[in-house]
Amino acid sequence: MDILSITGAAYIVAALLFILSLAGLSTHASAKNGLTYGMTGMAVALAATVAATVDASDGLDDRALVIGLLVAAVVIGAVIGLWRARIVEMTGMPELIAALHSFVGLAAVLIGVNGHLEGSHYAMDSLNNIHEAEVSIGIFIGAVTFTGSIVANLKLSAKMNSAPLMLPGKNLINVGSLVAFAILTVVYVAVEEGTGQDIILAVLTILALALGWHLVASIGGGDMPVVVSMLNSYSGWAAAASGFLLGNDLLIVTGALVGSSGAYLSYIMCKAMNRSFISLIAGGFGIAAPAGEDKDYGEHREIQADAVAELLSGASTVVITPGYGMAVARRRTRSPT
Amino acid sequence: MLIGIPRESKPGETLVAATAKTVSQLTNLGYDVVVEAGAGNAADQPDSAFVDAGVRVGTSEEVWAADVVVKVNAPSAEEIGRLRPGATIVSMMAPGRSPELLEQLQGAGVTALAMDAVPRISRAQSMDVLSSMANVAGYRAVVESAHEFGRMFTGQVTAAGKIPPARVFVVGAGVAGLAAIGAASAMGAIVRAFDVRPEVAEQVESMGAQFVEVDFESEVSSDGYAKEMTAEQEAATATMYDEEARAADIVITTALIPGRPAPKLLSAETVAGMKNGSVIVDMAAANGGNAAGTVTDQKVVTDNGVTILGYTDLAGRLAAQTSQLYGTNIVNLLKLLTPEKDGVLTLDFDDVVQRGITVVDGRDGEAAQITWPPPAVQVSAAPAAAPVAAAPAKEQKAPMSAGAKVGLVLGAIGLFWLVNALAPTDDLRRHFTVLMLSIVIGYYVIGKVAHALHTPLMSVTNAISGVVVVGALVQVASDDKLIVGLSAAAILLASINIFGGFAVTRRMLAMFSKGA
């Protein structure tokens, strides 16, 4: 039983715990257990990987530095994360989550860059090409997630105009970026190492960053909760792409779990808000600014507070629909208290 | 100012413009009130009740000499002559149909406020007498019809056999129609109703009736009243009226078009085709009636045994409550006209309600002006005609057909097969297997997520996606300083995500527990 088989087994355990965690989070009764499963799974994954890393660093010149950095990064990250989570207002939750997504996206970009720097040393050419493609895809998804999440965060925290950005030919921009990405990837894979790959990758990264920004900027502030969920899904795919890059099944499993559940959750939320899912993932594709309300919503009646009180006191059943007004107004607002 | 409440001069009128309850509300507004002796007798408001309410009971002369005279029916020529120049008269006047009345009022130099000219806007609902009286009348119409109808309304299954429920057809779902629907369905009848305004279907159904559909495009009313139909629509509806009336035991018609005679909806043939013993209550009798054979204020029995009631005093047949409602409408109006509560009536023509009800402006005494009709007031939320160009764009979102869905899924699976078939190593295929299974699991585990848990779920998946740290951890063990640095940065970022995500989810979930 060597360290690799131990970590491999631990990864399966962690993946299982993550599945249980997501399943648990779907009902109130099991939500707390689900959270516990998730934290345990993460602890298992972290412990196993750290152990593997410590093992792998055996024989490195500056092993102490690497391990020291590793521990310091985790501790600092934990402190920042816990601190932000503790002080955030409940109404500020979505923007915090959006900010957290951006970290995952950036981490995925960094991992991709590392993958590029390490290079690939397979015997087969095709495998080297696949490695390069994985680097490119991982960076692309990570970068889109990164800037997209930042924009979502800015829009949610009202630091940026929440109205959808309406660039002329924005659909063309989105589609064009995807095509450009495909071309750049092919070129990146095709050219030999050391012949301008760095530059291609840099262009690709900038393109992805710009696309992420534009995608989310094109969506109105009212749809941001769905966008955050969608970015969550993207961050999962980013992790899955990293998994392919590193040949790490845990990353693939977890990334795909998060990716598909996030996509489905976004879909449910879109349904609930009566929005088109396709339009959203495509960054406001085809969403003309809600054109003048040309639909007849029937008669409306105004009513004063005392009349409402009278109605309520005479009612046999009262249904309170929290959030209905918000949904109607398509925005979140902070309560005055 | 002094408000006079005269006794109604119209023969058989039971209503009074104020009750003991409303006069005390008027005195609270700062007015002095004098009620003519015997004014409220027919509405269960004896003089003693007014005296107990703290107002004076006086003679006819005293009442008509008041600054403000409030009554139910339009004043007669003789009554107008008794008004003081500069005084204000408040009553129902039907200004659209009685131009000579307005001229007489103008000649008398008085200000005339028509209670039946209140614009039908939400704010003015509390003073809309047509609504409050129509409501009572609609109820009473059902009671009158039940009285004439020789059978029970409710269906029953008894040991002695089955009694079918009465079928009631209500035409016009205005205030009166809706009240009739409510009363009839409360008595157990099967109620069907029709209105030319399709937007009231919901209201009809909420009152317990079935809305009768007719296939034609109809316009949304913009002023709160029904419009007369076009010839084309009329043909379609005429057939419907005929069928519905023949099937019904009781027909209650309430169709009125302001300023015009009531539309003839039930033809002589239709009435002749109705069942023996059935009843028509024609609530539009005052304006000529909706049914052929209606005689205003009369009960008529046709040759085939159909009873047609043309009563116009349905509201007056519930005198106490109608007077109370009318009186409350008056109080609400005077509240509006007495913003200072100092007993001084002031008119503000910038207010659409006050402008709307003022049919003669006699504030200048001799130079009184007829101010009818007022500018139109829009009440419906219906949009002004939408630009036609916008319409086609709305059509495009047809749901995907089942075949297209199957095709899409098969296509995706086929693509997946191709990718795997082209994968150079088994390792890669294994990764794809894992990926695919995980996607499916991810989709199914959250299939039934509770709505309130969307955000916590998002937050926990976010924390879990921090697992990308594993990748960075694997990479950090490197000789390349740059890679170590970048990996450390990635570890830091992912750690923020992991710890922050879980902690924030924990906080959220804590809010769901009791007492949090």
Image (tube, rainbow, N blue to C red):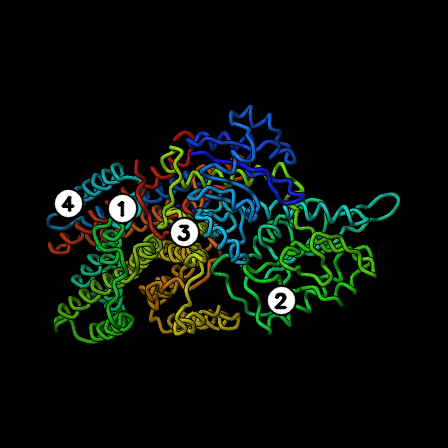
| Position of residue B465 in the picture relative to residue B203 (left or right) | left
Q: Residue at x 52, y 57 (%)?
A: B100
The CA span between labels 2 and 1 is: 55 Å
Picture coordinates of residue B352 (x, y %)?
40, 51
Name which residue type carries label 4: Leu
The CA span between labels 4 and 3 is: 94 Å
Q: Is residue B301 above or below residue A284?
A: above
Circles 3 and 2 on the same chain: yes
Q: Name the residue under label 4.
A: A69
Q: Residue furthest right?
A: B160
Q: Which of marks 3 and 2 is nearer the N terminus?
A: 2
Discs 4/3, front: 3
Circles 1 and 3 on the same chain: no
Circles 2 and 4 on the same chain: no
Label drawn at residue B368: 3
Q: Which residue is drawn at 49% across and 44% down?
A: B90
The CA span between labels 4 and 1 is: 26 Å
Q: Which chain carries label 4?
A: A
Name which residue type carries label 1: Leu
Does the CB distance between marks 2 and 1 fall below 8 Å?
no
Q: Nearer the viewer, residue A274 or B66?
A: B66
The CA span between labels 3 and 2 is: 48 Å
Q: Mark 2 points at which residue?
A: B214
Q: Mark 2 lies on which chain?
A: B
Discs 1/3, front: 3
Q: Name the residue under label 1.
A: A96
Picture coordinates of residue A246 (x, y %)?
27, 59
The CA span between labels 1 and 3 is: 69 Å
Picture coordinates of residue B63 (x, y %)?
52, 35
Name which residue type carries label 3: Ala
Which part of the image, by quadrant, shows the C terminus of chain B? top left
Circles 4 and 3 on the same chain: no
